[in-house]
Image: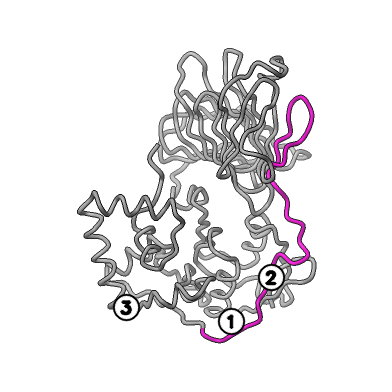
Amino acid sequence: MEPDYDINELLFRKLAGNLNPDELEYIDKQLSERQEVRNQLEELESKLQQQGVVFSQLAEDPNWTALPDLILDSQRRRWPRIIGYAAMIAAIIGGIFVAVYQINRKENVINPLAGAQEKEVELRLAGGGVVPLGRHPDTITAGNALLGNANNTLSYIEQVQEGDSALSGSLNTLTVPAGKYFKVLLADGTEIWLNSVTSLQFPFTFNGPTREISIRGEAYLKIAQNTQKPFIVHLLPAITDNDLEKGTIQVLGTEFNVNSYEGSTLKVALSDGAVNFKVAGDQVLLKPGRQATYSVGQGMVVGKYDQEEVTSWIKGQYYMTDVTLEDLATKFPRWTGHAVKFDSDHLRGKLFSGVYNRNRPLKAFLENMKETMGINYYFSPDSTLHFR
């Protein structure tokens, strides 16, 4: 399968010397085979040099604090959303000015994980037992299923003779903690990307007339087609003691995002194909580019959605437009695993627009916020992030 890379981003990071071996091999292959990619690289080099971007500074800065992916809004003005690597490159090529903040002063090294007990992605087997996937070998035998476990992905490989075959269709539970993400490749070829603080209940094999799984949290699904065996997703509320019922999504072959993070709301955003979303007595047949939101008291509401904002988390990016710091504080524990406290209440209402990139150091995000908004921060011994 062709890797899902963003060519613009890889070209930029190649110039900055920040590619892993797989990414470097991929982009070098593209450059050798495709003239349009070589043209992109030449144009990018020219435009960045005109803007005074010095790549040696980026290579020497392990936190890349000199290149913010936050364009912040502390004066309550909406900025153009030219955030993230690819968007930043497009902006420069298009002649839009993007400030590159030079942070040259030396500071004490901050270890935000000091005192934190980092949790792992876990697989709880239907037959009993818990497998910590972060520390487990590349293959796992569970019941009569052989599973692959590599590159943050759990995949079904094949059936094996040993083990309890009666458990193959029973539900296992994979749990992704705060600050982590994971992918699951099911036996039928369905791909599921799991965001942080998300759980997935699934069988290793689908033995009945339907393929059914349950999700609590957020996930993006690419369903393998099988007209003889419909795929059904049960979307479970994040909070189990309220009046919100679970949602049921029936599909044949499609791609969509599901989200039940908010205690009284269920969301389904369709990228391709068609799904039937049902909660309590309400149901809707969704078309691509539409999102259905069901909430207690409001019922079902359908409208357009911004696919970049809703699904960019798959690539590790969380877009924000005119978000208050208080709202960010509710999401940060899920994204990073750090609780957030305000030492100064007046900071709660400050607005900004930008992107949090989980593939970059947390310090880079916080330093950019500090430089552009004047918001100081520190970590207490229990790893809580304080804004002051």
Image height of 388 relative to 84, above or below: below
Image height of 95 relative to 273, above or below: below
Q: Main secondary structure of the magenta part?
A: loop
Q: Which residue is mark 2?
A: 111
- SS category of the residue bearing label 2: loop
First of labels 1, 2 by sequence position: 2
Task: Name the disc covering residue 374, or none.
Answer: 1
The amino acid sitting under disc 2 is Asn
Question: Badge 3, how many Cα within 10 Å: few under 14, some, many 20+?
Answer: some
Q: Quadrant of the C terminus?
A: bottom right
Instruction: State yes or no: discs 3 and 1 in contact (Cβ < 8 Å).
Output: no
189 with respect to 262 (left or right): left
19 with respect to 215 (left or right): left
Q: Nearer the viewer, residue 223 or 242?
A: 223
- Tell me the magenta residue range: 104-132
Find the distance from the CA under tag 1 to the CA under tag 2: 21 Å
Q: Which residue is mark 3?
A: 51
